[in-house]
Structure formats: C-alpha cells, structure tokens
Amino acid sequence: MHKKCLCSIFFHIARHAWENQEELKFSDNDVRKIAALKIETKKLMIKNEAETETIALDIMAGLWAENPDAAALNKLIDKKIDLKQEGAKKFIQAFVDLKKMFSREQLAKLKEICMRQECGKEAKCEGSCGKEAGCC
C-alpha cells in the first residue's frame, strides 16, 4: 500500500463522495455541501501557500540586502511558521467537518469503493503541491 498525504486523502474522499453519490446515498444537498467544503478548503490552501511563498521571498530578499536585519528576518520566519500552523489547523477542521458528513455506513461503503477503484493505482496529491503521494 502506498502512502498518501493528508491533502490527497481529503480531496480523494470529496471526489469519491461526488462521483459515487448514488451508491453512497447522498442527497443533492449533501453533495453541494461537500463540494462547497472542498472548494473553500482548496482556496484556503492556495491562499496559505501564496502567503507563505511571498514571505519566503521577503526572507530571501532580506538575506541578500546590504545590511541584513536579523530581528526583522526572525519576525518574518515567525510569521511564516504562524501561517503554516494556522493553515494546518484550518485544514484539520475541514477534514473533520468532511468526515462528519458521512454516516458509519457511508464511510464503510466509501472505503469499499476506494479499495475497488484505487487498487493498484499510484496516488497523486490533489492539494496545492500536486506532487506524488506522501509529499505533505
């Protein structure tokens, strides 16, 4: 079995819920809620990644400055770490919210569907990184 990153699992579950809504016995309203959560989570990941990359560029620019200011650079590092922590916490909440949308029976059925459809396939992250599974 291959390793998957958390973002890949989240988007995998949301995609399978949408693709197999009849088999999982989801109403149209349930599917709309899952889709909305997926979109909001994806937007959150994109914004967080963009802000983090921007801060990384500011750090690099500060390091290449004629007189680098260690205190200012340390503040940027703290800000970058805070952003990553905040993003991770929001992502975990989204994951918990997604899982709460499923009954026990639906989760068991989803696992069966995933095993049936994904057996033997190489996983790819569907999150902001787009790398191979296990990246995050």
Image: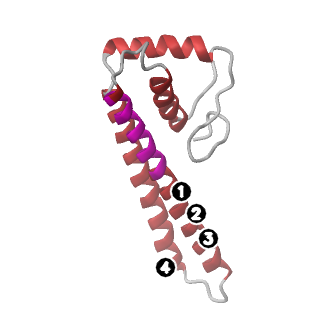
Q: Residue at x 53, y 75 (%)?
A: 73
* Residue denoted by label 4: 71
User: Where does the image place residue 15, in percent across and percent down from the top left?
Assistant: 50, 29
Q: Disc 1 on helix, strand or loop?
A: helix
Dot 1 amino acid type: Glu
59 sits to left or right of 87: right
Which residue is disc 1 drawn over? Answer: 49
* In-front residue for pair 130/2: 130
Eye-nearest disc, 4 or 3: 3
Given contact means CB atoms under 8 Å apart, are the residues at marks 3 and 2 in contact? yes
Provide the residue designation for mark 2. Answer: 53
Alpha-carbon span between mark 1 and mark 3: 12 Å
Task: Give the percent coordinates (x, y) of residue 96.
Answer: 34, 34
Amino acid type, mark 4: Ala
Badge 4: how crowded within 10 Å, few (<14), some, or many (20+)? few
Q: Are marks 2 and 1 in contact (CB under 8 Å)?
A: yes
Q: Which quadrant of the view contains residue 104?
A: top left
Q: Amino acid at mark 2?
A: Glu
In which quadrant of the rendered image does the N terminus lie?
Answer: top right
Q: Secondary structure at mark 2?
A: helix
- Residue at 68% x, 20% y: name it: 121
Image coords of residue 35 (percent x, y): 42, 36
Going from the N terminus, do you reach mark 4 or mark 2 first? 2
| CA separation in Å, label 1 and label 4 | 24 Å
Residue 57: which disc?
A: 3
